[in-house]
Image (spheres, helix red, strand yellow):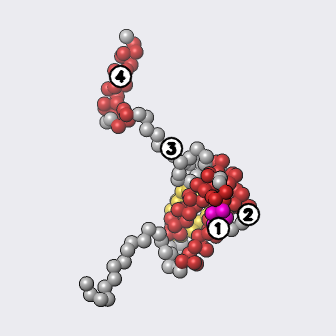
Protein backbone atom coordinates (compact mmCIF):
# COMPACT_ATOMS: atom_id res chain seq x y z
CA UNK A 1 0.00 0.00 0.00
CA UNK A 2 1.48 3.41 -0.92
CA UNK A 3 2.47 5.54 2.09
CA UNK A 4 0.16 8.44 1.11
CA UNK A 5 -2.85 6.21 0.60
CA UNK A 6 -5.59 6.57 3.25
CA UNK A 7 -8.68 4.48 3.66
CA UNK A 8 -11.63 6.59 4.72
CA UNK A 9 -14.45 4.95 6.59
CA UNK A 10 -17.99 5.86 5.75
CA UNK A 11 -19.67 8.05 8.34
CA UNK A 12 -23.24 7.43 9.38
CA UNK A 13 -23.96 11.10 10.02
CA UNK A 14 -23.90 14.22 7.90
CA UNK A 15 -21.04 16.58 8.73
CA UNK A 16 -22.85 19.55 7.14
CA UNK A 17 -19.54 21.27 6.28
CA UNK A 18 -18.98 22.30 9.91
CA UNK A 19 -16.62 21.32 12.71
CA UNK A 20 -18.07 18.97 15.30
CA UNK A 21 -18.72 21.56 18.02
CA UNK A 22 -20.45 23.98 15.62
CA UNK A 23 -22.53 21.17 14.11
CA UNK A 24 -23.65 19.89 17.51
CA UNK A 25 -24.54 23.40 18.72
CA UNK A 26 -26.54 24.01 15.54
CA UNK A 27 -28.42 20.70 15.88
CA UNK A 28 -29.19 21.33 19.57
CA UNK A 29 -30.59 24.75 18.72
CA UNK A 30 -32.63 23.31 15.86
CA UNK A 31 -34.03 20.55 18.11
CA UNK A 32 -35.09 23.22 20.61
CA UNK A 33 -36.77 25.24 17.85
CA UNK A 34 -38.51 22.11 16.56
CA UNK A 35 -39.89 21.33 20.01
CA UNK A 36 -41.04 24.94 20.39
CA UNK A 37 -42.70 25.40 16.98
CA UNK A 38 -43.32 21.70 16.11
CA UNK A 39 -42.48 22.46 12.44
CA UNK A 40 -39.47 24.23 10.97
CA UNK A 41 -38.16 24.78 7.45
CA UNK A 42 -34.49 24.10 6.77
CA UNK A 43 -32.28 22.48 4.15
CA UNK A 44 -32.91 18.84 3.37
CA UNK A 45 -29.51 17.69 4.68
CA UNK A 46 -30.02 19.50 7.99
CA UNK A 47 -33.55 18.14 8.31
CA UNK A 48 -32.35 14.56 7.83
CA UNK A 49 -29.58 15.04 10.39
CA UNK A 50 -32.01 16.71 12.80
CA UNK A 51 -34.53 13.88 12.50
CA UNK A 52 -32.23 11.45 14.32
CA UNK A 53 -31.75 13.76 17.30
CA UNK A 54 -35.42 14.75 17.52
CA UNK A 55 -36.59 11.13 17.52
CA UNK A 56 -34.07 10.21 20.20
CA UNK A 57 -35.17 13.18 22.30
CA UNK A 58 -38.80 12.03 22.20
CA UNK A 59 -37.67 8.54 23.24
CA UNK A 60 -35.89 10.08 26.22
CA UNK A 61 -39.07 11.97 27.08
CA UNK A 62 -41.11 8.77 26.93
CA UNK A 63 -38.74 6.99 29.30
CA UNK A 64 -39.14 9.76 31.86
CA UNK A 65 -36.28 8.60 34.09
CA UNK A 66 -33.85 10.84 35.91
CA UNK A 67 -30.99 9.77 33.67
CA UNK A 68 -32.97 10.48 30.49
CA UNK A 69 -33.88 13.90 31.92
CA UNK A 70 -30.20 14.69 32.49
CA UNK A 71 -29.31 13.60 28.95
CA UNK A 72 -32.15 15.69 27.50
CA UNK A 73 -30.98 18.69 29.54
CA UNK A 74 -27.74 18.59 27.55
CA UNK A 75 -29.67 18.69 24.27
CA UNK A 76 -32.57 21.09 24.76
CA UNK A 77 -31.65 24.74 25.31
CA UNK A 78 -34.59 26.05 27.37
CA UNK A 79 -36.47 24.73 30.40
CA UNK A 80 -39.86 25.39 28.79
CA UNK A 81 -39.09 23.09 25.85
CA UNK A 82 -37.53 20.50 28.17
CA UNK A 83 -40.76 20.44 30.16
CA UNK A 84 -42.75 20.12 26.91
CA UNK A 85 -40.70 17.07 25.87
CA UNK A 86 -41.38 15.22 29.13
CA UNK A 87 -45.06 16.14 29.39
CA UNK A 88 -46.88 17.09 26.18
CA UNK A 89 -44.80 15.20 23.63
CA UNK A 90 -44.23 12.14 25.82
CA UNK A 91 -47.98 11.80 26.34
CA UNK A 92 -48.75 12.39 22.66
CA UNK A 93 -46.40 9.63 21.51
CA UNK A 94 -46.81 7.13 24.38
CA UNK A 95 -48.45 4.55 22.08
CA UNK A 96 -46.19 5.20 19.08
CA UNK A 97 -43.11 3.00 18.70
CA UNK A 98 -41.02 5.39 16.62
CA UNK A 99 -41.08 7.74 13.67
CA UNK A 100 -42.05 10.84 15.63
CA UNK A 101 -40.89 13.26 12.94
CA UNK A 102 -41.50 13.62 9.23
CA UNK A 103 -39.33 15.31 6.59
CA UNK A 104 -41.38 16.83 3.75
CA UNK A 105 -39.47 18.23 0.74
CA UNK A 106 -40.32 21.88 0.05
CA UNK A 107 -38.62 22.70 -3.24
CA UNK A 108 -35.46 24.69 -3.86
CA UNK A 109 -34.21 27.82 -2.14
CA UNK A 110 -34.30 30.74 -4.54
CA UNK A 111 -30.83 32.27 -4.29
CA UNK A 112 -28.67 29.14 -4.25
CA UNK A 113 -31.07 26.32 -5.28
CA UNK A 114 -30.44 24.35 -2.10
CA UNK A 115 -33.09 21.68 -1.53
CA UNK A 116 -35.37 22.78 1.30
CA UNK A 117 -37.59 20.67 3.54
CA UNK A 118 -40.02 20.97 6.41
CA UNK A 119 -39.42 18.81 9.44
CA UNK A 120 -42.39 18.39 11.74
CA UNK A 121 -43.79 16.19 14.46
CA UNK A 122 -46.45 13.73 13.33
CA UNK A 123 -49.87 13.20 14.96
CA UNK A 124 -50.42 16.85 15.76
CA UNK A 125 -53.04 19.39 14.67
CA UNK A 126 -52.11 21.31 11.52
CA UNK A 127 -49.61 18.82 10.14
CA UNK A 128 -48.70 19.02 6.46
CA UNK A 129 -49.69 15.42 5.71
CA UNK A 130 -51.73 13.10 7.95
CA UNK A 131 -49.81 10.30 9.61
CA UNK A 132 -50.32 6.80 8.32
CA UNK A 133 -51.59 4.08 10.61
CA UNK A 134 -48.91 2.00 12.29
CA UNK A 135 -48.34 -1.23 10.42
CA UNK A 136 -49.75 -4.21 12.27
CA UNK A 137 -49.45 -7.78 11.20
CA UNK A 138 -52.83 -9.51 11.20
CA UNK A 139 -51.44 -12.96 11.90
CA UNK A 140 -49.80 -15.79 10.00
CA UNK A 141 -52.40 -15.53 7.20
CA UNK A 142 -51.12 -12.03 6.32
CA UNK A 143 -47.94 -13.61 4.95
CA UNK A 144 -49.97 -15.45 2.31
CA UNK A 145 -50.61 -14.04 -1.17
CA UNK A 146 -53.89 -12.12 -1.55
CA UNK A 147 -55.54 -14.91 -3.57
CA UNK A 148 -54.79 -17.48 -0.86
CA UNK A 149 -56.12 -15.11 1.84
CA UNK A 150 -59.34 -14.65 -0.12
CA UNK A 151 -59.72 -18.42 -0.52
CA UNK A 152 -59.25 -18.97 3.23
CA UNK A 153 -61.76 -16.22 4.03
CA UNK A 154 -64.35 -17.86 1.75
CA UNK A 155 -63.71 -21.25 3.37
CA UNK A 156 -64.26 -19.74 6.82
CA UNK A 157 -67.51 -18.12 5.69
CA UNK A 158 -68.78 -21.42 4.22
CA UNK A 159 -67.87 -23.26 7.42
CA UNK A 160 -69.73 -20.65 9.46
CA UNK A 161 -72.89 -21.02 7.32
CA UNK A 162 -73.05 -24.81 7.81
**Residue under label 2:** 79
Q: Nearer the viewer, mark 3 or mark 1?
A: 1
The answer to which of marks 4 and 1 sits earlier in the sequence is 1
Residue 8, numbered circle:
none
Camera-near label (2 vs 4) is 2
Q: Residue furthest top?
A: 162
Using the numbered discs, state the Cα–Cα distance from disc 2 to disc 3 in whole angstroms: 32 Å
Front tag of 2 and 3: 2
Q: Which residues lie in the magenta part?
A: 70-76
Q: Nearer the viewer, mark 2 or mark 1?
A: 1
Is residue 27 left or right of 86 when viewed as pictured? Answer: left
Q: Residue at x 65, y 54 (%)?
A: 65
- Which is more N-terminal, label 4 or label 2? 2
Residue 31 in view in this figure: yes
State the residue position of label 3: 134
How packed mark 2 is, by other alpha carbons closer than 10 Å (few <14, some 14-19, many 20 or more), is: few
Instruction: Please name the residue that numbered disc 1 is placed on.
Output: 74
Task: In this rendered view, identify the residue nearer to me: 34 or 126.
Answer: 34
Mark 3: few, some, or many residues within 10 Å (few <14, many ≥20)? few
Residue placed furthest toward the bottom: 3
Q: Secondary structure at mark 4?
A: helix
- Image x and y of residue 77, in percent: 68, 68
Mark 4 lies on residue:
154
Q: Position of residue 11 (x, y in %)?
A: 42, 71
Amino acid sequence: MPPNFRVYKARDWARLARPTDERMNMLKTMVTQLVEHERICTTLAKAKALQRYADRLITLGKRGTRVSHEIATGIVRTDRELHKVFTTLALRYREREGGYTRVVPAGLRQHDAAPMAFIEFVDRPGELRPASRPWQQEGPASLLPPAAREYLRQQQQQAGEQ
